[in-house]
Amino acid sequence: MAQPDILVRNVTIVTVDRDRRVIEGGWLTVTGDRISAIGSAGDAAPVEASEIIDGTGMVAMPGLIDSHSHAGHGLVRNAGAGVDTWFEACEEIYARGSTPAFWRAEARMTQLERLRGGITTAMTLLGGGADIYRTDDPAFGDAHSGATAESGLRTFMAVGPGRPPFPRSYRHFSETGQSKDVTVSFERQLEVSEILIDRWNDLLGRGTGVCLVMPVYYAAQVADADARRQVIEMGEAVMDLRRRKGVLFTQDGHRDGSIALARDLGVLGEFALLGHSVDLTEDDFTALKETGASIIHNPSAIMSVYGRCPVPELIEAGINVCLGSDAAAPDRGYDMFRHMAQCMHYHRRHFRDPAYLPPGKTLEMATIDAAKAMGLENELGSLKVGKKADIVLVDMRKPHLYPPVMPVTRIAHFANAADVDTVIVNGKVLMRGRKTAHLDANDILADAAEQAALAFERTGLTHLLEEPQEFWRNARQPLPN
């Protein structure tokens, strides 16, 4: 056998493989971009490798997968003054206050946060809020995808059309700061999306996947025959592009009958990942079973306050459910360990039963179930010989992670992003001892601060960066003297 490139030894391996093996005192090797061997303490491990990592006191697990997030939000998440105002700020900044430099700076910062938290694969919408996607020009998607490629992580960038009426208005800035408003048609947004797919869709190679997105529609919005016909035509155009390019499709904000409507509009299939999905109807369940679409549960999101995604019921019905951060936002970041814990408590409180969503199942939702939703379960989502070497080492030698028993429980209930010690993606060590040699954190953070400040200044929204007095009281409670 040829000498492996990487040997991780003396480690507890949480494989999430078909048998859900947990190997104490195990070892694994990486050759090229693949896992080449996995062994237990009783198996003879290779003596030499190009790089040897001592995993004593650590857990090796599959890289975490964040199935739903928003590009851009990282530089807007600290804007205060309430939910509605925050969404309005996102819309204004994304459409009229951002430049390619903004999207590059945000992606660099987000990828650093993900890397430090053990997220090796993510799906992120190029915008969001009120369905504002920067598909008016390829430069914005180029900036985001270029930063992803530099980070070494994997990201599906979701691009597509916004919501009618068209044309939509966007603002472009020159290098000297001069601005001009442009109008963008539905056809142009699809054209830009196709350009970006052709340029960047290589998730397992360069790490820069591209998928399609279009707005969610509710029954009241298509009650009029002309409106319904327009939405059907839009869906047909998006689905035609999806079929021609063989890419995934995602949507943000399903609830209360909208999944059944999406089926009727012809935009569902095994290629679809549906975000939030709260207060689902019986028809929604039927549509999911008929089409094979997957659900993305976002337990920490505002939409999970307004309604409930019936995760245990979906799983019981045989529907695939994965986990997403819906980050960034004023109340959450990309820490998938936090979202796993939130997921368990969310549904246990609903049923008033601590047996719901055990730790292992929740970990599956952030690994193998997410890989399945993306059609990548044969490549990602578990530690298995032949799969891509996307491996995270979590340092369990922490007071909040002791005593050293039941590693799956400790990972799902007690670990956090700061416990991640080492990250390997595509067979390359991107972080070791929490050091990221290929990424200059100080430069990334300085760039992020500068681009965020410029975006708020361009849109006249700097007042949203001051915490309002209401943050010091409960709702409807008077301020103290």
Image (cartoon, rainbow, N blue to C red):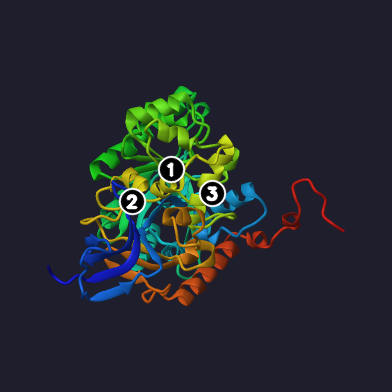
Between the C-alphas of marks 3 and 1, the distance is 14 Å
Q: Which residue is mark 2?
A: 16
Image depth: mark 1 or mark 2 in front: 2
Q: Which structural element holds mark 3?
A: helix
Could you tell which of marks 1 and 2 lies nearer the N-terminus? Answer: 2
Q: Position of residue 132 (x, y in %)?
A: 48, 48
Residue on which disc 1 sits = 296
Q: Is residue 254 left or right of residue 349?
A: left
Q: Tell me if residue 188 can be seen.
A: no
Q: Nearer the viewer, mark 3 or mark 2?
A: 2
Label 2 is placed on what type of residue?
Val
**Chain-order first, disc 3 or disc 1:** 1
State the residue in front, 170 or 259.
Answer: 259
Depicted 340 relative to depicted 145: above or below: above
The image position of residue 364, as x and y in percent, is: 38, 47
Q: Secondary structure at mark 1?
A: strand
- For disc 3, the marked residue is 342
Name the amino acid, label 1. Answer: Ile
Q: Position of residue 136 (x, y in %)?
A: 41, 52
Q: Is residue 466 above or below residue 195?
A: below
